[in-house]
Amino acid sequence: MPETELEHLRRRLAFQARLDDALESASVRRVPLPEALGGCLPALLEVLGATQAWVETLDEGLEPCVFSEGPAPSDALVERAQQLVGEEGADGALLELEGETLFARRLDVAGRTFGTLAALVPASAPTPASELEALLHVAAEELDDYLAAVRNAREKQRLLREIHEELRHPIVSEGVRRAVARIDDTVRFDLLIVIYHLEEDTQDSVHYLVFRGPELEFATGERVASELDSLLAESASASQSEVLIRNAELEHRRITGEQLDPLSAEDESEELLRRLGYEDYLETLLIGGLADGTAVGKVVVGSRRALTTYERDVFDLFADVLQKRCVDYSRTGRELHRTFGVPVVVRLLDQPDWRSLLAPRAAEISILYADVSSFTRLSEQILGEPAKVGELIEVFSREAVRILWEQGGVFDKLVGDCVIGLFGPPFYDASPAERAHACARAAAEISRWTKHELPKSQSPAIQEIVAAGEPLGVAIGINHCPVSVGTFGPNHDFTAFSPGMNNAARLQGLAVRDEVLVLEPMRALIERECPQARFSEVRTGKVKNVAEPLRYYALDVDSV
């Protein structure tokens, strides 16, 4: 006797309760996805009278996977089920096969597909096809939300890792751009305003980036938004989100020529957003620390529709990582930048194993020692005061290090008034001749700058030296040799050690003002890379603690 509609309904409700209990238990116990589905698919097999049942979805690693009960379905069968529900408007469908019927149902939430639920039922099954479809629909409805929650959790976790990775970039604005591109792969937004203040900024310095969708529209000092500049000049953290959105819209429409109805100061927040076309917004303050609670920035999201819980979670994750990034801005980057130029720091931190590049190793590198000529006389007889001496060293060393970095060198250390540079680390991807040539270029430029440009400095200490009629110059020694190079000691200072390093220092001691001396092996390397380089006749010099005299040449600084 055929089952009544009431009996069908009771069966569906009992089946729904059974699946609901199984999935709730799986959630409470936090079991892996295969185990959770293993509590549901046998029930589906039983209630449908099926021979096979499966779920095609993404596993917890977000990789395509098929979970099945009964004989594993063939790839062709899985693909046929996908095709059935992939047809336009087909949330569920069936297909008559030889002696069997394939039932399939799309798994989705709010239009977002999570996979396919399918079963193979003998054609002789007593239950009507319409009822089997209804039971499959019940199972799909139960699995939809569970699989969506699993996938959302894994996607958020993966996105969090990606945001962390992108915001490791030593330049915060670039890190934010990359992180926003990652976010755009997952959620959609209409307007995103990111405001932040960094530890080393001046007190009133505020950075902003405005994204219209995934595209960067405005950025501090790059694509300036005068409406935001004026607002943030008054108060960055205190600015209401509605006003920030308004000013970003005003700037956008000023540039695009779009008209905006006049806005009055009396407009309420919700009315202001509505008139700007925004239905919802999210604001998250970036707090600098638990102790003082100082705001270091703000993230504002404007949406022309209601934001979902998932979208709010994603932007909260982004704000949380950015907050840590601002508080800890370039702690690593700043430490590296004491030794390496910005392009090198960026390249280093772009590599997951960057620390291994700084570990001590044996390598052949080029070395530069640059010392202010007559420094003792200038310090004791002209400047006199320690503060003035410090000013001389500060002006000279800053430019000397800038030149080192510009030529691809590494700043080892400052010893008194002597700047020490290394060429080769940290990537060691230049040839020995290229390293030697870069070192020679840096030496020549430091020599020329100290002789011709340093006297023009507005520094009172420098001007006092110039007024006394004393020339300014530098004595430099360069060498290429094997060393042990990397981070050493309790402070992890990046430096190098070797007898050849000591010889570069000794050679610098033999040089007079405006002279760059080159040890004999390095001359051949420079000439290999720069045939037009000119050198003096060979010289020899006896130095302390070295048995044989040093053989060296004076480099014509205008020839490299």
Image (cartoon, rainbow, N blue to C red):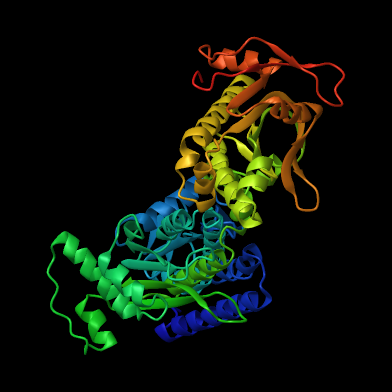
In the displayed structure, would residue 557 be above or below residue 222?
above
Image spot of residue 273 (x, y percent): 26, 80
Q: Residue at x 34, y 63 (%)?
A: 210
Image spot of residue 189 (x, y percent): 34, 66
Report which quarter residue 309 is drawn in: bottom left
Q: Residue at x 68, y 76 (%)?
A: 29
Image spot of residue 257 (x, y percent): 13, 62
Q: Nearer the viewer, residue 447 or 318?
A: 447
Report which quarter residue 196 is drawn in: bottom left
Query: 205 left or right of 482?
Result: left
Q: Is residue 344 visible?
A: no
Q: Residue at x 12, y 69 (%)?
A: 259
Q: Is residue 269 visible?
A: yes
Q: Nearer the viewer, residue 112 or 505?
A: 505
Q: Nearer the viewer, residue 360 or 97?
A: 360
Image spot of residue 139 (x, y percent): 50, 72
Q: Nearer the viewer, residue 370 or 427?
A: 370
Report which quarter residue 192 is drawn in: bottom left
